Image (tube, coloured by chain):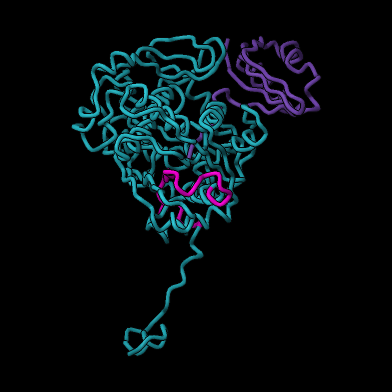
Chain colours: A purple, B cyan
Amino acid sequence: MAKRQVMFTFPQRLIKEPIIYNLGQQFKVVTNIRRADVAESRGWVVLELEGEEKDIEQGIAWVTARGVRVDPVIGDIVEG
Amino acid sequence: MSYARALRCRKCGQEYPVQPVNLCDFCLSPLEVSYDYKAMAKGLSREKIGQGPLSMWRYRDLLPVEGKEVDIGAGFTPLVKADNLGRELGLDRLYIKNDCLNPTYSFKDRPVSVAVTKARELGYDTVACASTGNLAASVAAHAAKAKMKAYVFVPSNVEKGKLVGIAIYNPILVTVEGSYDDVNRLCARLAQKYHWGFINITLRPYYAEGSKTLGYEVAEQLGWSAPDCAVAPAASGLLFTRIWKGLEELSMLGFIGPVNTHMFLSQAAGSSPIVNAFQAGSLHAHPVEPNTIAKSIAIGNPADGYYALRVARQSGGGAAAVSDEDLIAGMKLLAQTEGIFAEPAGGVVIAALKKLATSGIIKKNELTVAFITGAGPRTQEVVSDIVHPFVVQPSLESFEEVLGVGV
């Protein structure tokens, strides 16, 4: 089992969709939310994903394809 | 002996031992080093610092290291009174902290010196980082000095000229095909999988502390006092928060009076998530896609955005973004008034300073320090249009004719 810490940023149109629920259901990924904030125009969630490496990869690809931005929880790693 | 006591979560306060970890297990927020300031205050004085080496290591007792430092001579760079530039901007008491004059030409030598020292102390034989230039050069140079192996990851579209400044130190240089975000994701996974001292990930709490020395130095160079205003560039936002932390610590230790410095951060408009959040009155920097020539500070998803925003607000400071055109004008103005050739990030600082001074936010008589954090020669192509030499034949006549001078 692998673990991955990520930040999802939701555009306004996706705020009401149960994306995290579906991620867990469809890809056998355990989602564990640690911090979150939802504002009028955007929302973000910091969470840990746990599951098989390939399920996590496929799950992230699906979430990204839905229009959610997925980043490492530590922010950008490439620096100047 | 180090006065570092623990790593502490910056959000929820949970504490951890001094180990190579960077995230809180509970809330996944960044950790920072916490110190025994009481013991530090007893063992340290201005005089003791004054007797130390003329490098950032004169502040060793304020840094989280135990072992012998990996020192290539970083820090104690000049704080220059910038009268010519001050006159242009209408500021009577302007200083430039010229951090171009570090061994690998940027402020990164400060945090990297601490992080590589810590890596060696923690038993790593390999360090790593992902960078488009300044950080990679600094990590490779410090690893060479420490006789450690260095893996350096660079996006494949980085200018070839920058690679030379990294490769000269002989790290294992890896160029990664793919977008900037792809490189980010790959490196997050590499840091999890390999037992390397990943300088700005697993060792980030220690890396961060090196930048405090910029704050210490400025205060010491001003005769142990904090400036009224500070203007610094922001990429991840880490440097900005650490200049402030450095000043606050000196005040807490009684080496300077209360800190009333207004902290202003500056970004290029093409990559300004922190400035956007400041202007929107938010403390969360929403990620953006960077698009600016100021590549050394083009970070779309800043790790320390929240903390940088807090410093800007709490200190009664602010945030300003400037266009690429304005930052180039800033680079030229700094070079042509003070003789300092900065990289585009320095142009951002000068252009932002101009904006803040012109609008009266920074006032004429306030003692202001502008932080110039990297040198220009590595990115000189952005101002290459400035070259218009007079072409003469090797004779006096030709010289006088072409330049229109004579007896």
* Quadrant in the picture for residue B74: top left
Give how far across and how far down residue B31 sits, in percent. Answer: 47, 18
Regarding residue B315, the answer to whether it shows in the image is: yes
Kindly give the residue lying farthest to the left in the view shown: B51
Residue B380 lies in the magenta-colored region: yes
Quadrant in which the C terminus of chain B is drawn? bottom left
**Count of labels shown?**
0
| Residue occupying the point 43% across, 10% down | B16
* Quadrant in the picture for residue A10: top right
Q: Is residue B25 above or below residue B370?
A: above
Q: Is residue B260 above or below residue A46?
A: below
Q: Is residue B406 above or below residue B38?
A: below
Give how far across and how far down residue B10 sits, in percent. Answer: 50, 18
Please indicate whether residue B45 sits to the left or right of residue B259 in the image. left
Residue B184 lies in the magenta-colored region: no
| Residue occupying the point 42% across, 22% down | B205
Give how far across and how far down residue B240 sits, in percent. Answer: 47, 34
**Viewer-nearest residue: B199 or B342:** B342
Kindly give the residue lying farthest to the front in the view shown: B365
Quadrant in which the N terminus of chain B is drawn? top left
**Viewer-nearest residue: B131 or B9:** B9
Q: Which residues are magenta?
A: B357-382
* Quadrant in the picture for residue B107: top left
Please indicate whether residue A5 sits to the left or right of residue B230 in the image. right
Give how far across and how far down residue B243 sits, in percent. Answer: 42, 33
Please indicate whether residue B6 sits to the left or right of residue B294 in the image. left
| Residue occupying the point 43% across, 25% down | B204
**Viewer-nearest residue: B324 or B262:** B262
Regarding residue B303, the answer to whether it shows in the image is: no
| Residue occupying the point 49% across, 11% down | B13
**Viewer-nearest residue: B321 or B166:** B321
